[in-house]
Structures are given as structure tokens and as C-alpha cells.
Amino acid sequence: MEVRPHTARSLVGRLRGAAAACDAAATAAAVAAIRLASKDDPAIRAPLAEAGAVPLLAAQLPAAAGVDAAAALLNISISAREQVASAPGLLDALTAALRTGAAHHAAATVHSLLCAEAHRAAIGARRPLLAALVALLRAPPSTRATKDALKALFAVALYPPNRATLVSLGAVQALFALVITDPRHGIVEDATAVVAQVAGCAESLEAFRWVSGVRILLDLVDPGGAETARARENAAAALLNLVVAGGDPAVAEVLAVGGAEETVRELAEDSAATPRGKAKAEALLRALEGAARRREHRLADFLNGLVQSDPYISSPASASTHG
């Protein structure tokens, strides 16, 4: 049992000494050794954190050893999430790393930390970090970095107060750009999953209008519109969350797209659809039909009010015809 703590202290001591001596080559070698150990032996991850590896690795994120440092932090975070999350300056270092060649490991580390619900508020309060994640969606194609950024953003959006922040940072536009233009495997599924979460705040409706988001989602809900069943059900979930958060204005936005109700009904009645997709479509259809009935009642009340207030107006039911 003492072997791993001893090995961890030795590896961390080697990195500490090389960094103190400003020996770039020795520092890079020490970081690579910690990365390899944390990859090959999960049981050494917690001892590495206890030996003080996290702040030393974080300090190397901007350096030449940044990729290995980020990968090592990711490995350690899987088994020692609290030690990684509480390290001073770590989130600032990860924010900077998201704009470097270590972006995919840095984004994956952020996602790993967000797997603990307790960290979502604190990370969501870091606007520069969220902005860097959103920027990764617009960066030159890198499937690993994009997917890791989407996973991190999904976890961020699971905490409702973070959704408005993501909207203000342009996440809606970046996400729909991926949905429309990115053919890479799994990207549309992951992007629509994030869209579904971000849609659950009142601020999202205006952002959806700017990118014709409702029409795009309805196209995905339409049979054959999405390449996978998961993307289709995510689109239905996004529309439902938008309607729940946005109320009647959001319902009107959906109904303004021709054939919206029929498209949603097709998914609700599709025997080949996933149970989750059908359930979301059924709930959305109830919301749309309920809003339509409310509008009819309001119109009827308005017309009745006119008839009662003006004797020269006849209601359609009481009007007589003259030949």
C-alpha cells in the first residue's frame, strides 16, 4: 500500500525540482512521467493529488508541456475530483489552456469537474472559462476538442442559472452553426443535447429567433430530418423546454412555422421513435394544442365583448340574413 504514495511523492518531487531549476527539458519529462503513471495506474491518481501534483501541473499548462499537463490533470480528476477542483488558480489555468493545443484535454478536465453537481455554480460563474468553451465551437474543426467542449457545456447548462450566461456569450448561435454545417459523427447529437438544455431559460427565445432556431429544430423533428433518433429526440426536447421557459410567446414562435403541430404529432405517433422522443413530442403537442384553445377562447371573449358593448354589432350566431 505504501508503494504508490512513495512513487507519487517521487514523481511530484522530480517535477518540483525541475520546475524550480527552470530546466524546461527536465520539467517536460517529469510532466510526461506523471501523465503516463496517471494513465496506466488509476490507483496512483489520488496519491499524486495528495503529494501536490495539481498546482504544479496547472503551472505547466501554458508551457511546452501543456498537453501532457492537461492530460495528467484530466486523469487525476477522475479519481481525485475535489483535490483538483480546489487547487488555487486551476480554473484560470484551464481557461487559458482552452485556447491552446491542450484545449481538448482542458475541456475534458472541466467536464470531469462538472460531473460533481456541487461545482456547477462555481464554474458557471467563470464567464471567461465559459466564453473559451463557446469559442471552441467556432474554432477550426477538431472533433475531440469540439466534443469535449460540448460535453462541458452540457454539464454547465444542467445548472439552470448558467443558461442565461451561455445565451449572453453567444452559445445559441455557435450551437446552431454546428447543427447546420458540421457533418462529423456525433456532433449534431451532442450539439442538440446542449441546445435542449440552454432552451430552458426565458432569455433563449430571442437568441433562437436570430438563428431561426425553431424552424431548424422542427426540421430535425420531421421524419428523416435528423440522421439519428437521438438528434430527433433532442430537437423535440429543445422545443418543449423553449415553450415551457418562454410561455405563450415561445408557443407562438413554434406555431408560426407552417405544419409545426403536424410535425410534432408525427413524432408522438411514430412507433419507431424512441420512448423519450415520443414523450417529449406528446408533451409539446399538448402545450401547442392548449395554447391554440386559449387563443380561440380569447378571440371568442373579445368578440362577445364587442357585441355586448355595441348594439350595432351582431354576433355570427344571432345575425340574420335578408334576401
Image: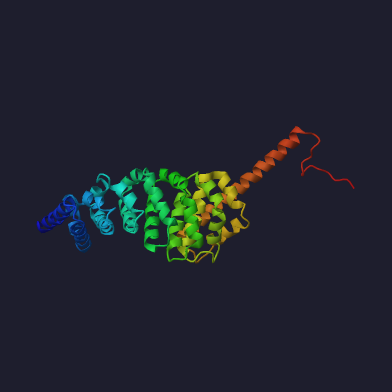
Left or right? Give the position of 3 relative to 272. left
Query: What color scheme is it?
Result: rainbow
**Residue 64 found in image quarter:** bottom left
**Residue 74 found in image quarter:** bottom left
Q: Camera-side residue: 38 or 197? A: 38
Left or right? Give the position of 62 relative to 284. left
- x and y percent of residue 134 in the render? 42, 52
Decide: is 144 above or below 202.
below
Identify the residue at horizontal 72%, vertical 38% (top origin).
Answer: 304
Any part of residue 138 in sight: yes
Q: Camera-side residue: 299 or 159? A: 159
Identify the residue at horizontal 32%, vertical 53% (top origin).
Answer: 97
**Residue 310 found in image quarter:** top right
Identify the residue at horizontal 41%, vertical 45% (top origin).
Answer: 162
- x and y percent of residue 128 in the render? 38, 46
Q: How many marks?
A: 0
- x and y percent of residue 202 in the render? 50, 44
Any part of residue 114 in sight: no
- x and y percent of residue 15 in the render? 17, 54
Quarter the N terminus occupies: bottom left
In the picture as drawn, the residue positioned furthest to the right comes out as 323
In the picture as drawn, the residue positioned furthest to the left comes out as 2
